[in-house]
Amino acid sequence: MWRTWSCPCLVAPGSPNCRPVESLSVTTTSSDSVTNPTATTTATPSATAGATAATQHDRTPLRVVVLYGGQSTEHSVSCISAGAIMDHLDPERYTVIPVGITQDGAWVPGQSDTAQLRAEGRTMPTVEDQGTHLMPVLGQTAGEPAELRVVTGQQAGETFASFDLVFPVLHGVNGEDGTVQGLLDLAGIPYVGNGVLASAAGMDKVFTKRLARVAGIPVGQEIVLEQQRPLTAEEQEQLGLPVFVKPARGGSSIGISKVDRWEDVDAAIDLAFAHDSKVLIESMIHGREVECGVLQHPDGSLVASVPAMLEGTEDGAEGFYGFDAKYVDSTVSASIPAPLTEEDTRQVQQWAIETFRALGCEGLARVDFFVTKNGPVLNEINTLPGFTPISMYPQMFLAQGMEYEQLLDTLIQRARVAR
């Protein structure tokens, strides 16, 4: 039985705070009709397997720092994801300690009122600096609570909060690229999600493709620029038109251009270099855009979600799945599970898990593909995908029976045993 959800908001549908922001309608099947071919072909459990281990808790709530914001161009997207996560962490199981990172890089007390972490049309939330700056204490003893201390003002040196674990909800540079993960590793602080290597390799699309090629995963054709220069005639002939020009280490489609005429490529290269010092120029892959989530259970087993297919990605003004299409306009819808053949579904799920393994991922990832007439081709991996309730990652697992709260719980419990 098919059902359609088209609530275009960044909070739980039907809640008092429901407000339009990200217009992404989602078509899913009811959970009892969804299967996961990967569970049998790769000997991984279903999405709900391991739930018993994931829901075993001490009676004392776990103190979780939700870290968000950051210095990247995806600052506001991070705020929105963090607000949704805080709304869905069970208060009987978790004590949430919000900590924001300003666009200047200061760690500050975060926003407890998650209504302030939602977008209003094109007005996006940001982390504000009220003057109190924080810093994690390095060299924590294993098994002991971690600490954040105040480093400014009359309270400098005092403990702001003791906590057990960090949930880094940071998208983009200086957050999703291994930098914060390295800091937390040095501090001896457990955290949710991917470590330094996987985060760095996943953030850099060039290295993602290199590792995928070594693992035998199909990828498209690209040219890498590490300095601004025009493409040669040979490179233009190799790539063909149209091409996509993008920052190698960007996200949320910021700085990306679709180029249909070679006379426009230099401007697109300039835009991409404004966001990164390395630029990727990719041949267009003709196929359906499909996403697949990978989740690691506390026992280490991996499960691939049912895939989601994006529709209408070329209908907006940008002509592709750009920032406005993702977060502002009403042009994109998604079908979950994706209307693929059984073989294409199985292959997408298999390649998603193989990509996860090739990069040495931990905890979670969303892996994006183009499904062509010759099968799936890897587009990119997101080591910290969007986490609004209507983002694809939670929606794909919801389609096979895993509620948002259970998904968060599984990730946190995996972090407790992994680090």
Image (tube, rainbow, N blue to C red):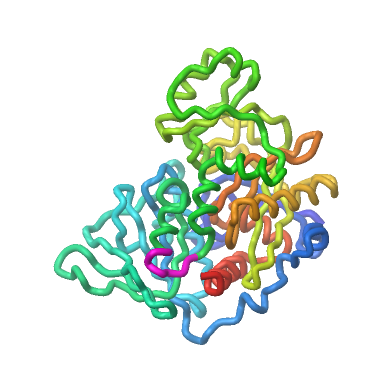
Relative image position of residue 381 (x, y in whole percent)? 60, 47
Relative image position of residue 323 (x, y in whole percent)? 51, 38
- Locate residue 101: give its quadrant: bottom left
186 in magenta: yes
Residue at the image position 59 percent from the left and 36 percent from the top: 321
Residue at the image position 51 percent from the left and 45 percent from the top: 203
337 in magenta: no
Q: Is residue 208 visible?
A: yes
Residue at the image position 52 percent from the left and 85 percent from the top: 58
Considering only vertical position in the picture, is 218 above or below 175?
above
> Which residues fall within the magenta stretch?
185-191
Relative image position of residue 5 (x, y in whole percent)? 67, 53
Relative image position of residue 76 (x, y in whole percent)? 42, 48
Considering only vertical position in the picture, is 261 above or below 115?
above
Q: Is residue 336 visible?
A: no
The residue closer to the viewer here, 18 or 97, is: 97
